[in-house]
Image (tube, rainbow, N blue to C red):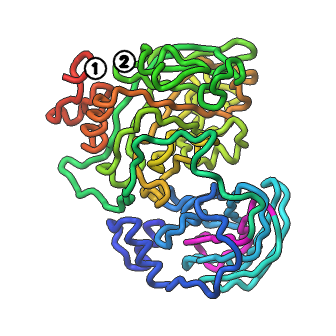
Amino acid sequence: MSNRRLRRIGIPIGVTTAVVASMVVGAFQLTSASAATGTLLSQGRPALASSTELGESPAAAAFDGNNATRWSSQWSDPQWLRVDLGSTATISQVVLQWEAAYAKAFQIQTSPDGNAWTSIYSTTTGTGGTQTLNVTGSGRYVRMYGTQRANGYGYSLYEFKVYGTSSTTPPASDGPGYVMANPPVTGVVPSTATPPPTNPPTTHHEFQANCSVSRSNLPDDPIVFFGLPGASHSHTFMGNTTTNANTTLASLQAGGTACITPGDKTAYWMPTLFNGDQAVQPVGRQVIYYKSGVLDYRSVRPFPAGLRYVVGSPSSTQAEFQNHPGHVEGFECGDLTNQWDIPANCVAGSQLNVRLQAPSCWDGIHLDTPDHKSHMAYPVVGVCPQDHPVAVPMIEFKMAWPVSGNMANVHFASGRGYSFHYDVYNAWDAPTLKALSDHCINGGLQCDPRGFDQYKPDRGAALNENYVLP
């Protein structure tokens, strides 16, 4: 919600988003008009939108089961909000819980592939509030397609609920492909607290892991293709020096590292960048941030040993990459910013840069799952979802490749620029990771790899001059 809108409804600018949302929900008395028909299929599922008004109103907020969060769009027509149900489903009911900025004219559409759409409901006399729509249709994707706003603002939904019957059974929580945490982390309630003001103000809660390329042009992936050497596209590996198709936590812990911090034996890898048929490797240590992804940075706890996951997807479309919950600024080079594919040209002598953030909410149960993603989730408006309640460090890759000029033949081993993704397999020395997390993330500092904040030197460092515990 913009500052202009906050002022119009008489809410002080300093009030937190969660408080604002709860106040607005109470004002509009959002209640279901009738009993649900079928099973709720949309909650927690991946979501995309044509636009968002602010970073605090993402597409995912309309599918989190929380009436205190919302999606809102830019102030123009048309706009859409889409959910991926994961498999083809028979749709029997859709419930829309609108904020004051609602759709007067809109359609509910379904699609088997996210491209071809069929309308299963249409109106030009939408009333806002809570609309319970009994519909008949099928598809994997369901979207609200708005064509006329009721007022001068955008479209804004607290919740978009899709009910029906899925063609697949719910996934198992253990079995092949699941790696269980031992012990699991249970009983965690996601923190909704707002840290108190500090003097000087707390503006960052992070530390850096500076790691060089340790292995290159290797067609292995120990997460996706464990035990299958040569089965993947080419990867550039950073950090641990032993990573290969047969990597395990024990082999990483016994290996070396190309990170400046000896305790960081984590394996990091990404698709190899090519200029034509020539591989291009990042030069020197690359920046891998460990940050807080939640509002209450004091609630972040270190990764468990052996946690592994994939960020992004080699099969992403450009729209999916641009709207990915971990997107930052896309690709950059020279004066070009916010590019969602590799630019056609970069100023001679510049570098190609990309940044992508990882999910930072863990289910507390699994170190890995069959899709290598389901055990992790992104926060919604700064709070972890109930089914992924454990706040862990949010990793952000900030990569740079020495390539410029004509970029027509520059691509990743996985494809176009928007196929960029990366993998993380945690093998930190546990006391070292805890010291950095406690001092820098929980302590609200902007730390280098030693855990030293140059802007707050009086706070000291977590590690000594050799980047080890004192």
Image x and y of residue 244, in percent: 58, 18
Q: Is residue 349 visible?
A: no
Secondary structure at numbered mark 1: loop
Label located before the other in sequence (2 or 1): 2
Kindly indicate the quadrant of the structure image that contains residue 91: bottom right
- Residue 467's tag is 1
Residue 141 shown in magenta: yes
Q: Residue furthest front?
A: 175
Q: Would you place residue 350 above or below residue 151 in this image? A: above
In this view, the residue in front, 267 or 166, is: 166
Q: CA distance from mark 2 to mark 1?
A: 7 Å
Q: What amino acid is labelled 2 in the image? A: Ile
Q: Give the magenta part as a residue range.
A: 139-164
Query: How many numbered discs?
Result: 2
- Looking at the image, residue 308 sits to the left or right of residue 312; the answer is left
Residue at x-position 35% and y-position 59%: 191
Image x and y of residue 260, in percent: 36, 18
Residue at x-position 55% and y-position 59%: 58
Q: Is most of the magenta stretch helix, strand or loop? A: strand
